[in-house]
Amino acid sequence: MNDFFSYVYETLFQFYRDGFSPDLLDNSMYGLIGSVAVGWAVLMAVVYYFVILAKRSDTWARWYWWLLFGVLAAGIPPFVFAWLHVQGDFDGQGLTYETGDYVAFGFWTGVLAVLAYGIVSNLPLRWLTRNGSSVPFPS
């Protein structure tokens, strides 16, 4: 998983910082953070479709609520987790980098989570739920 997520970050997102990115790869942070981000995004998509829409389908079944929930609930926690976990781990090892490196890595982790939320929402989940089959796009 570490190699897969390093490819996603470094090639698709063009996130590469001298010294910082090799340390992420050597400490298997790409795999851990990427797996947590995608897992959290899947969990938030399940919560949106099977908990929120099951209870309040008439008010929350709009594309803007889907997008807002995706950015806030699926994107921000992985951003914070990636930033603070990597910074804490690297500080414990005596590796020092600028705060901007940690924030940039956290930002791209949030983007990864929101993309995963969008993919999981539109491929399997919206077709499995009765209340949310038209969210975010009408069928």
Image (cartoon, grey):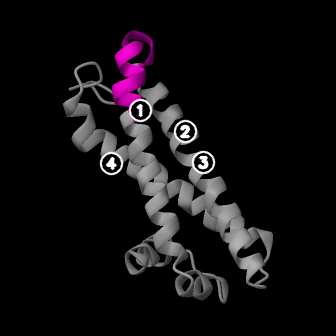
Query: Count of labels shown?
Result: 4
Rendered image quadrant of residue 50: top left
Distance between the alpha carbons at the discs numbered 3 and 2 = 7 Å
Q: Is residue 21 magenta?
A: no
State the extent of the magenta-drawn residues as a range.
47-60
Q: Are marks 3 and 4 in contact (CB under 8 Å)?
A: no
The residue that disc 4 covers is: 119
Kind of residue indicated by mark 1? Val
Distance between the alpha carbons at the discs numbered 1 and 2 = 10 Å
Among the two numbered marks 3 and 4 on one chain, the one whose residue lies closer to the N terminus: 3
Of helix, strand and loop, which one carries label 2? helix
Of helix, strand and loop, which one carries label 3? helix
- In the displayed structure image, the side of residue 30 where residue 87 appears, left or right: right
Kind of residue indicated by mark 4? Ile
Callout 2: 10 Å neighbours few (<14), some, many (20+)?
Answer: many
Above or below, 21 relative to 65 = below
The residue that disc 1 covers is: 47
Among the two numbered marks 4 and 2 on one chain, the one whose residue lies closer to the N terminus: 2
The residue that disc 3 covers is: 77
The residue that disc 2 covers is: 73
